[in-house]
Image (cartoon, rainbow, N blue to C red):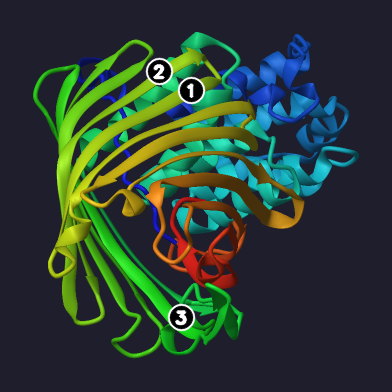
Amino acid sequence: MTHAFTVYPARMKRVSRRASGLLCCIIAGTVVSFLSPAMAQEPAKPDATAQHSSSAAIQSDRLGPLSVPDETKASFAQLPEKKRLHILVNLIRNKQHEAATTLLAATPFKGKFGRNRNLFVQGLIEKARGNLEKAARIYRTALADDPNLSMVRMELAATLYALHEDDGARHHLDLLKSAAPTPELARNFNDFIATIDARRPWSFNVYAALAPSTNFTNGTTEEIILIGGLPFVISGDSRKKSGIGMKGGANAGYRLDITDDLAAIVGSGVNFTQYDGRTFDTTIVSQSVELRRSHGRGSVGVGVTASQAWYGASEFLWSAGPQITVRHALLRNLVLDTRLAHLWTFYKDATYRDGTTTSLTNRLALTLSESRVLYAMAGADRLKTDLDHLSNIAGWAGLGIYQEAPLGVTVFAEGKARYSVSNGDYPLLGEKLQQTRVDGRLVLTKRDFSIFGLAPQLEYTYTRNFSNNTLSRYDAHGLALTVTRAF
């Protein structure tokens, strides 16, 4: 699965003052209310016993390791669960994680939130011991059961950052930022994202996947068509073919901060598919350079993009042109991304297809919670060549959803419909070529199953093309099994 390269605006002056402990401060300040539906409740004021225990924990770094006598265990067991959670977190934050381990073992949490509270505290303990990978696994286990545990997600993001698994940390911070209940929290999460970008201004991603397809030629199932009342047999590469192929590629990017709000973004990528020897192999290489200016509610970028494509063994086209990208937060949880591009396209052999393509793409993302995002997409493009029947205008629209479900499964589903009509009559058809293409995509990720910081991912795609030209009618089912770091 291809992962788009995205760079977030950096606030370098603020980041330099906050970088190391920002997220931990967010977590420590709100940890008592980390479980839904208790998140909206104010934590209860501690009684004298809780205050005494908290004071001991706060001073424990000066007193040395604390022992836990039986009477302390007995008193601790009588406290409400929220107060016990508060005491355990304070102990762990102040390097008394072994005392917290003893108390948790003596009086584990029970009831509706008990399992995830136990996991949360166990994750904090393992992190305090320096077992970061184990801590991350524990947090993922809790989120697999309930993806709306904000404090667990915050701790997971901080742990992944400490493990230098920046793609995963950024993924969770981006969800937290979009679902943040206050502007200040959203700014804090955005600052932590900027910290990641400042630490690693470059990105690199490699992927490979098995890709079985029922119709990798996009060919028709018809055997005979009528042209002018005469029957013709369809054969060769125009027919539907199935097979198991390979998909893969690599993407790289670099961000150079020029000023606090202006950056140069350079990106490059190569993607390939292989199904039937060299006949249906495709390779696409792309590059882009952009100057991006950030502002309080988003960014504006101006740049150029170029690509080359090979079909089989020979280069068959290349294209280049300017593009403008705009990101604007209409609301804190409602973001609009727009891209406008104008490309000149040149074919190596079929020069009669040389021309221009102008495209406008819009995507609106509505974050309902840190585990659910809805998408609405729409766009239009215009292809212009010297031949009217090869020129067309098209429009498309679609909907999508990102949902972290229980059992550790993340679901991303989207559907799109595209309609196009040629400018002139198509040869042998006697009228303009009209096509309606429907695309569906379903991606499943097992986010609590991590190997070397990677999670398995299964992608299913379906395409159905309707047309007034028999040769252009087809459908195809496809699968791809790969891995991802953003989970």
Task: Let me know if residue 428 appears in the view.
Answer: yes
Q: Say which quadrant the N terminus sits in.
A: bottom left
Label 3 vs label 2: CA separation? 44 Å
Task: Let me know if residue 265 appears in the view.
Answer: no
On the image, which quarter does residue 286 sit in? Answer: bottom left
Indicate whether 429 appears above or below 356: below
Numbered label attached to residue 328? 2
Q: Specify few, some or many for label 3: CA neighbours under 10 Å numbering under 14, 14-19, or 20 or more.
A: some
Label 2 vs label 1: CA separation? 6 Å
Q: Which residue is drawn at 80% across and 25% down?
A: 37
Q: Where is residue 165 in the image (x, y as percent from the top left)?
A: 38, 51
Give, as a three-letter code, the residue at label 1: Val
Label 1 vs label 3: CA separation? 42 Å
Looking at the image, is mark 1 or mark 3 earlier in the sequence? 3
Q: Mark 3 points at which residue?
A: 238
Left or right of 328? Residue 13 is left
Q: Which residue is drawn at 35% across and 53% down?
A: 389
Q: Give the structural element (helix, strand or loop) at label 3.
A: helix
Q: Give the structural element (helix, strand or loop) at label 2.
A: strand
Q: Where is residue 338 in the image (x, y as percent from the top left)?
A: 38, 27
Whether pointer 2 and pointer 1 mark residues with C-beta atoms closer than 8 Å, the reply is: yes
Q: Mark 1 points at which residue?
A: 335
Give, as a three-letter code, the residue at label 2: His
Give, as a three-letter code, the residue at label 3: Ser
